[in-house]
Image (tube, rainbow, N blue to C red):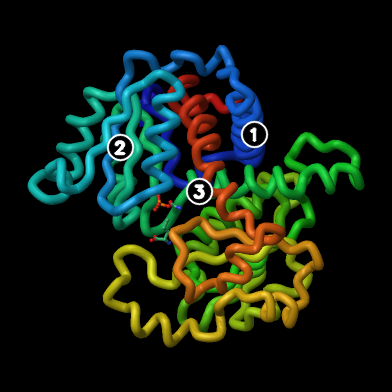
Amino acid sequence: TSPFAPRHLLSIENLSSAELTTLVRNAHQYKQAIKSGSVPKSLLGALAGKTVAMTFNKLSTRTRVSCEGAVATLGGHPMFLSKADIQLGVNESLYDTAVVVSSMVSAWFARVGPHSDIVEIAKNSTVPVINALSDAFHPMQTIADFLTIHEAFQSSRTRERSPTPGLGLEGLKIAWVGDANNVLYDLAIAAGKLGVDLAVATPRGYGIPAGIRDIIQKSGTDARVQGKLLESNVPEEAIKDADILVTDTWVSMGQESEKEKRLKAFSGFQITSALAERGGAKPGWKFMHCLPRHPEEVSDDVFYNPSRSLVFTEAENRLWSAIAVLEGFVVNGGKII
Ligand code: CP
Ligand code: NVA
């Protein structure tokens, strides 16, 4: 790569532990400032006169709304291009599209199928490319998730501990019950980097692929305390002493033809209050889900329980984290400070 190559965000793996912490802290700070009516000076007009491309090969509610909103907050123009709008992948190669689009914009959010597509786009783009979901990773979701966890757990924990330069989440335990997928993989990388333990329960045959497990285990080695990864096929085992229960759809976009088979394979993995109790989650356990949600993976009594479920704050936090990412990767040219 040339010294002038832009810095891309394709996975949480691209961030150090310290940078991930900084993005979450910045997002938290911008959320408070903007919600109380003042856009920080460093953000005001920071993308004025600039265009940010948003090519989405799959449907999206949260990612589209948060990324478009974040670009607008910084004074830029978000240019949304669905797969029905552009030639990408249909009538034109990834290489040609990458060269052409990046010659006219300042940054590029891309939602793709295979992760190799966004790697190819980034390799040939002259501007920062930010992953808006691929079949392997979802970094924008993970940053919002740790903003949500930081807000929900940090204050009670720092009362017990001395202030730390990190997020103060070391020793927290997340249980992921359901399908091992893109959302899980970046969550796992981040958990390792932030000293958060993660127990994953999937049905047999639906666990973390070996190549991804390697990435997860290697990427937490720069952490002050690396979070532990535990894997099992028994939901109750993962849930034991967990502070947070998390799941996602059992049928990700692109897997629609496997729906029937998957629903059968995942039976018994629905997160319910009864399962949390049987598994021995911590008394104050919380629930998270990146959305969109389907009733099979989590019952209404958990999903809509205001004292357990963080899901709607988690969704809103996509906006605040997108602002922090744009500042670091686009406004500041890849310096996360
Ligand atoms: N969580 C998430 O990325 O949702 P969308 O697919 O609606 O963007
Ligand atoms: N795992 C889901 C996440 C959607 C935001 C999917 O890839 O469809």
- What residue sits 69% from the left and 61% below the top? 308
First of labels 3, 2 by sequence position: 2
Which of the two residues, 53 or 319, is positioned nearer the viewer here? 319
First of labels 1, 2 by sequence position: 1
For residue 203, side relative to residue 128 (left or right)? right
Question: Is the shortest distance between ligand 1 and the CB of mark 1 under 8 Å?
Answer: no
Q: Amino acid at mark 3?
A: Gln
Residue highlighted by disc 3: 141
Of all residues, the one furthest to the left in this rendering is 91
Which of the two residues, 299 or 80, is positioned nearer the viewer here? 299
Residue highlighted by disc 2: 54
Q: Residues within 10 Å of mark 1 (few under 14, many from 20)?
A: many
For residue 86, side relative to residue 217 (left or right)? left
Residue highlighted by disc 1: 28
Q: Quadrant of the N terminus?
A: top left
Distance from label 1 to label 2 (Cα)?
A: 24 Å
Circle 3 — which element?
A: helix
Pinpoint residue 14: horizontal percent, then vertical percent. Answer: 50, 42
Q: Residues within 10 Å of mark 3 (few under 14, many from 20)?
A: many
| Quadrant in the rendering for residue 298 | bottom right
Circle 2 — which element?
A: strand
Q: Residues within 10 Å of mark 2 (few under 14, many from 20)?
A: many
- What residue sits 17% from the left and 44% below the top? 88
Pinpoint residue 38: horizontal percent, then vertical percent. Answer: 59, 18
First of labels 3, 1 by sequence position: 1
